Each structure stands twice: as C-alpha cells, then as structure tokens.
Amino acid sequence: MNKKAEELGLKNTNFVTPHGLDNEEHYTTAYELAVLTDYALQNSKFANIVNTKSTTININGANRNITNTNELLGNLNGVNGVKTGFTGNAMRCLVTSCTREGNQIITVVLGADTKKQRTSDSIKLIEYAFKEYERINLEEIIKKEFENWKQINESRIYINKAQRKNIELELENIENRIIPIKKGTQKDIKVEINCIYEYEAPLEKGKKVGNLVVKNKEEIIETIDIVVKNEIKKKNIISYMIQFFENLPTCLDF
C-alpha cells in the first residue's frame, strides 16, 4: 500500500495497519484520499462494488443481505460511491464520488462529530461544486492558440546552414486536456508562447525550441515543450553546389 501511495505521489500518506484503525503512524489527508479514490475508481470491479446499495451473499449455505453504509448512495443524484469510515480519532468520515452530465467530482469529509454532519457537509460540497464549476476543453484552446502563432512566427525562424529553409514545429503531449474552472472565469485562461528564432543546423527531430505556458491568472496550469517536427540536416558540398547553380543567372543562346 505504501509503494502504491508513493507511485501516486502521496507524500502525506502512510499505512501501518491493514484495517485502518487508529495508529500514530497511520495517516493521510483529505486531498490524498481523493487522489487515491480517483485511482481506485479506474478499476471497474471496485467502482461496481462501491456503487452497490445492497446485495445478497451466501455464508456457509445461508443467504445474508448486506447493505452499503454510504447514506448518500441512492439518495442523492449522481452519487456512485465510495466509502464511509469511523474511528475514535478520525471521527465520522465520508469519501463520495458523484457524476452528473458526464462530470465527476470526489469530495472528502473528515472529522465530523456525527453521521448527520458528515452527510450534510458532503451534500454542501457536492452541490457547490456542480453549481459553481464547469469543465472546459483546454486542449482545444491550446491547439488554436498554437496554430495561430505558427502562421505568424514559424516562417520567421532562421536556421543557418540548413538544407531547407522551412521548419515545422509541434507540441509535446498535452496533459491537462479537460480542466474544471469556476464558471465565468474562462477569460482568465491565457496562453504564452516563447521561442528562440535563430539556430545552427543540424536540428534533430524532437529538439526543444520553446514552450507554451497556460495560466489561470498567475497560476501556471501547464507548460508544454515546442519541438522540431522533422529533422533539419546541415548543408553539405552537394547542397552548396545545387544552391550555386540555382542562383546562376539564366543564359540564353542567340
């Protein structure tokens, strides 16, 4: 479990007990519980289990009905999991997954005094998130800005001693393709493009020549490298000879 937590980048999580009961060395945070939950829900079997309100199991030949203790499951629009919890130190806890119109959120309530309080706080968080936030297609914005920039600037890049004049540029992978933002704040999303305009051949494919920075006000959302799409070779003697003859004035026989 600790190895998986490390893989997920959970720096404030540590497991020492298999059952989750109180121990000073057994801890996590609300945010890291949300990250762990997001990872776990990618497993279809896990997602199906936590979304099951009740089921019947067979123990030693006898049927027994068991019911999910998640009080929001089946009672609040879109809720599809995930986990209740209680210990003397942690108090009442609830991790909730909720999906509406294709948008999924995960909320985490820890340390509630009562079951009623954790339910109420979870509902407030869920309703606030769906009311105040929306998802935008950041990839579409990035590609549009980059294409507009290329039309103006790609031809301005000079490569000395290159076999061909033109350079083709592309973006590395975009990690945050869809992002949530507070409704009405898309105008705060800005794209900055930085590039060096002079190079010496050769340029290998994939060489970084600049970057594209996406900001929400002053917060950097993503930085993407701008790279050379195709290799640009250095001129050789044959290239110089071809260029020489191409530049000779045309001779006419009379």
Image: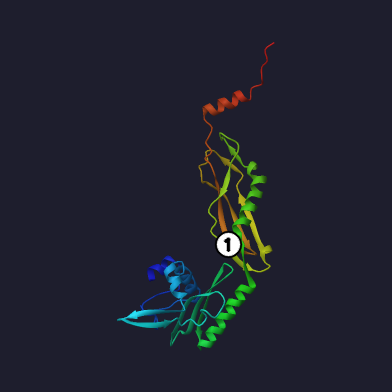
Label 1 belongs to which residue?
178
Q: Name the side, left or right, on which 214 lies relative to 236.
A: right
Q: Name the side, left or right, on which 105 lies relative to 247.
A: left
The number of callouts visible is: 1
Q: In the orientation shown, which residue stands out farthest toward the top?
A: 254
Residue found at x 57% / y 48%: 170
Q: Position of residue 81 (x, y in %)?
A: 49, 75
The colouring scheme, among rainbow, by chain, secondary structure or one colour, is rainbow
Residue found at x 61% / y 44%: 197
Q: Nearer the viewer, residue 143 or 153?
A: 143
Above or below 212: residue 247: above
Q: Position of residue 34 (x, y in %)?
A: 49, 73
How busy is the neighbourhood of tag 1: few (under 14 within 10 Å), some, or many (20 plus)?
few
Asked if residue 113 shows in the view, the reply is: no
Q: Secondary structure at mark 1?
A: strand
Locate the N terminus by quadrant: bottom left
Locate the C terminus by quadrant: top right
Q: Position of residue 126 (x, y in %)?
A: 58, 76
Residue found at x 34% / y 79%: 58
Q: In the orientation shown, which residue stands out farthest toward the left?
A: 60
Residue type, label 1: Ile
Above or below 186: residue 83: below
Q: Nearer the viewer, residue 148 or 241?
A: 148
Q: Position of residue 115 (x, y in %)?
A: 50, 87
Asked if residue 4 shows in the view, the reply is: yes
Residue found at x 47% / y 76%: 82
